[in-house]
């Protein structure tokens, strides 16, 4: 099993863990930022929002790893694109979750 496949499975597992720890704010597991830990409502929302996306990212990366050999793509190129996918995907998840939390807070204030 390649390192990339292990990382994909790890992302899937992390997504599941984040989804499961939606009930209680904690300082160990879950999507933890200032906004997500501001109150229980934000915590619950952030865990579901980010957990789903982390899980989806892991599944997409795993599928791409499985189908990449069918196209006879260079292994080094696959690893490079995989690394870029992880970095960009993770950054997008963080940004999207924070934007969603800010939007939720603004709607709550009105």
Image (cartoon, rainbow, N blue to C red):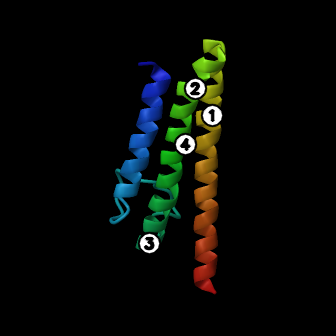
* Residue identified by numbered label 1: 85
* Residue identified by numbered label 4: 57
The residue carrying pointer 1 sits among few (fewer than 14), some (14 to 19) or many (20 or more) residues within 10 Å by Cα, namely some
CA distance for labels 1 and 3: 32 Å
Q: Earlier in the sequence, mark 2 or mark 4?
A: 4
Q: Earlier in the sequence, mark 2 or mark 1?
A: 2
Residue closer to the observer: 74 or 3: 74
CA distance for labels 2 and 4: 15 Å
Quarter of the image where one finds residue 39: bottom left
CA distance for labels 4 and 3: 27 Å
Measured from the top left, where is residue 105 in percent x and y? 58, 75
Residue 39's mark? 3
Q: Residue at image x 51%, y 32%?
A: 62
Q: Secondary structure at mark 2?
A: helix
CA distance for labels 2 and 1: 15 Å
Q: Nearer the viewer, mark 2 or mark 4?
A: 2
Q: Residue at image x 60%, y 27%?
A: 82
Q: Are marks 2 and 4 in contact (CB under 8 Å)?
A: no
Q: Earlier in the sequence, mark 4 or mark 3?
A: 3
CA distance for labels 1 and 4: 9 Å
Q: Nearer the viewer, mark 2 or mark 3?
A: 2
* Residue identified by numbered label 2: 67
Measured from the top left, where is residue 75 in percent x and y? 60, 13
Q: Is residue 103 left or right of residue 18?
A: right
Q: Secondary structure at mark 3?
A: loop
Q: Earlier in the sequence, mark 1 or mark 3?
A: 3
Measured from the top left, where is residue 37 in percent x and y? 45, 64
């Amino acid at each position: 099993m390649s390192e990339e496949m292990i990382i994909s499975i790890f992302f899937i597992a992390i997504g599941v863990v984040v989804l499961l720890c939606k009930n209680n704010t904690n300082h160990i597991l879950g999507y933890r930022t200032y906004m997500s830990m501001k109150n229980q409502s934000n915590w619950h929302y952030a865990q579901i929002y980010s957990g789903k996306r982390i899980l989806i990212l892991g599944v997409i990366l795993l599928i791409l790893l499985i189908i990449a050999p069918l196209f006879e793509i260079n292994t080094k190129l696959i690893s490079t694109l995989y690394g870029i996918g992880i970095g960009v995907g993770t950054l997008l998840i963080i940004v999207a979750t924070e934007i969603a939390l800010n939007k939720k807070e603004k709607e709550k204030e009105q």
